[in-house]
Structure formats: C-alpha cells, structure tokens
Amino acid sequence: MSMSTAVEQAVHEAEHQLTDGTWNLAANETALARDTATDTALDNAIGPADSHQALPTIERLAALREAIAALAITIARTHGHLAWFLAQCASHLDPVLHWRALEAPEGRAFRTVVPTSDELTDAETAVLLLAAMLHRTGQLT
C-alpha cells in the first residue's frame, strides 16, 4: 500500500472518530493540531502541491525529513487520540527514513536507497493529506 493511501485511511478513521464522538478534541489538542499544521515544518516542508517536484531530490528528501521531525516533536508533546493518530501517520512515512539522495561510496549506505520520483511524490502527497487534516482539526472548537 502506498504511503499516501495509508495516511488517507488514517485520516478517514480520524475524521470518523471526530464525527461519531469517539474522539473529543480538547482545546489543547485543537491548538496543537493547528500549530503542527501551520507553524512547523509539516506545512512549510512541502509547500503547495506540485511545487516541490521541481526541486532536486536532496531538497525534497530534506523537506520530508523535516516534516517527520515536526510530527515526532508533536507526538512527544501530546497523548491520547492525537498522539495515536500522528504516530500512525508517522509510521506510514517510515520509508522516508531509509532513503538517501547521495550516491554511496562502494555501496556503503547503511541499507539506504535512492527513492524514485514517484516514491518522493507519494510521500509528499501523504504529508499534504496529513497537513490538510490537521488544518481542519485545528479549526474545530
């Protein structure tokens, strides 16, 4: 399953929990979701859809790693449903942590691989889906 499909499924599950009342957002969760979406690398790392595809692989990979770091920081600052949701999404982005943008001398790259353009785009789409969900969640009161 692609990263974007997996994140999309997590987003749908979260939206369902918010709609049916299984997940009742506390004010601090709403603020943290909003902050994560807007004030961190998550929103800024990828930028508008399709703009990132013109960037070199090393910059695209750096942006994706910044987004994962923003998720990790947010997960460390919260608990409950928001932490579980973000952890699930972050785990779907795990392949990004195994990618490299530089050629490895003599194949010594700690089992990392150079991602394809499609893989980068899939990861970027996943981050955009997550950022959009957090924007919506951050507007709930």
Image (cartoon, helix red, strand yellow):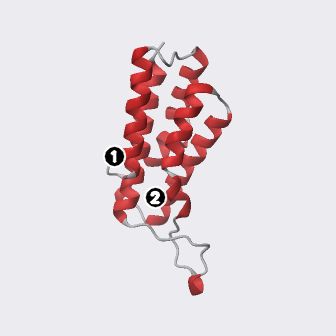
- 46 vs 130: above or below: below
Q: Which mark is residue 49?
A: 1
Total numbered labels: 2
Q: Residues within 10 Å of mark 2 (few under 14, many from 20)?
A: many
In this orientation, does residue 97 appear? Answer: yes
Residue lying farthest to the left in this orientation: 50
Quarter residue 19 falls in: top left
- Is 37 situated above or below 118? above
Give the secondary structure at mark 2: helix
Residue 94 at x, y percent in the picture: 53, 54
For residue 60, side relative to residue 12 (left or right) = right
Q: Nearer the viewer, residue 116 or 92?
A: 92
| Residue under numbered circle 2 | 60
Q: Earlier in the sequence, mark 2 or mark 1?
A: 1
Please, is residue 139 above or below residue 123 in the view?
above
- The amino acid type found where label 2 is placed reads Arg
